[in-house]
Each structure stands twice: as C-alpha cells, then as structure tokens.
Image (cartoon, helix red, strand yellow):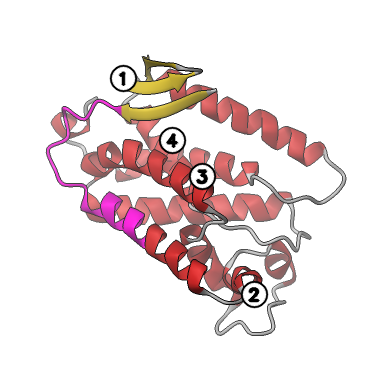
Amino acid sequence: MVMPLGDDDSQIHITPIITFGLIAVNVLVFLYQLTHGNIEGFFQTWSVIPVEYSRSTDIAPTHPGPFWITTLTSMFMHGGWMHLLGNMLFLWIFGDNVEQAMGGFRFLVFYLLCGIVATLAHILTGPSSEIPSLGASGAISGVLGAYIVMFPHQRVRVLVGRMVTQMPAIAVIGLWIVLQFVNGLGQLAQTAETGGVAYAAHVGGFVAGFALVWLFRRRNPQIARA
C-alpha cells in the first residue's frame, strides 16, 4: 500500500484559492449531511443513481429539481469521514500544482468536467444500478491525470508500510491507476449488483484529466514545469 503524504511545492508561487475552496465546499457539505435527519433520503435525492439516467426519469419521490443535477451535487458529497479525508488529502497534495499550471478559473472548469465524465463512465458500466453514487474521487482522478502529464518526475512523499520515502509522481499515480483498472475489471466481472468503490468513475475521471489537460494547461513553460 502506497499512501501519498505530500509533494514538492517549492515551485508553487500562488495561493491555490480554487483548491482550498473545493476542499472547503466538500467539508461543509459533509458537515451539513451530518445534521440531516434522513441521511438515506438525502443520498437518494442528491447522489447519482444510474438507472435514473438510463430511463431518463427520477426515482427519488421528493427530488426538488431535474435528476441530472445530481451529476454536480454528487461530487461534493461523501459517505463517511474516511471517504472525505482520503479524497481531500489527494486534492490537497496534487490540486495546487495543477491549479497553478492552468489558472484558477480553468482549473475549476477542468475539475467539474472531469467529475462529470467520471459520473458518465460509472453510469455506462452499470446503467440499471439503483445504488446511489457519490464522492469527489472522479473529479480528483482527473486532477491526477493532469498531474502525471505535467509533473511526471515531481517527488512525492509516500508512506509504504511503516516507512516514509519519496517516489516520482509517475510511479505513485501510475500504481494507483493500474489498481483502479484491475479492480474495475474485477467489479465488471461480478454478476451481483453491489456497492463499494466506483472504479469506473476513477478510470473515467483519470482518462478525462489526461486528455483535457492539453486544452486547459497554460502555454507558459515556466508556469507549467515540474
């Protein structure tokens, strides 16, 4: 198990307002979830339910708007503290570099697009599923896809077992995406519908980030260098 702890931020010359803002929104939404009396109903209303998209209908009886709005709302929700903290750790480590390389507004649009593509990938791999899907990991996977393109040799501090060491980003993120592919294929091979990690969303978000970074990165090599 390789757990990222931080990266080399010596080249960061901005205050990553968008990254901080996204983290803040995710935390605030999670805290709001904790105050909600009917958390299952909250998830049913604001999470992505693939069957709603394949049937083009809303199965949540009290939904205040069109079902497709969950494409956005779901990426700011989390199923528990560990889910939230894990996602925010990855966004904290890798988001500032990508934000600097793109600029704040471009980074925000990029992040949201990656989250939407990740959601669509999840829906396509299980269009009949009635299990709510939520979390920022699809959008953050897009950030990882951009990071590995622009900063493949950036040193990342990682926890390996009980030892803290440094590895190049291409190795850390490369191991992560291989694991998502393998687990995703295993999930597709299952005949029973189960909950758990939406690996297809991770892969879809990563591929989106890997592709979209070429459109969203700034052309100034001094800003985009590792």
Residue 69 x, y percent position in the rendering:
53, 72
Measure the alpha-carbon separation of dots 1 and 3: 23 Å
**Amino acid marked by disc 2:** Gly
**Amino acid marked by disc 1:** Arg
Q: Which residues are magenta?
A: 7-25
Pick the front one: 27 or 188? 27
Where disc 1 sits, the SS reads: strand
Tell me the residue that label 4 is attached to: 145
- The answer to which quarter of the image holds residue 213 is top left
Name above or below for residue 26 compared with residue 161: below
Name above or below for residue 28 compared with residue 216: below
Whether the residues at callouts 4 and 3 have beta carbons within 8 Å, the answer is yes
- Which disc is residue 41 wearing? 2
Q: Residues within 10 Å of mark 2 (few under 14, many from 20)?
A: some
* 124 lies left or right of 33: right
Residue 131 x, y percent position in the rendering:
72, 60
**Amino acid marked by disc 3:** Gly
Tell me the residue that label 3 is attached to: 205
**Amino acid marked by disc 4:** Gly
Nearer to us of marks 2 and 3 is 2
Q: Earlier in the sequence, mark 4 or mark 1?
A: 4
Residue 167 x, y percent position in the rendering:
38, 16
Pick the front one: 135 or 216? 135
Residue 161 x, y percent position in the rendering:
51, 18
Tell me the residue that label 1 is attached to: 155
Q: Residues within 10 Å of mark 1 (few under 14, many from 20)?
A: many
Q: In the picture, which quadrant includes the N terminus?
A: top right
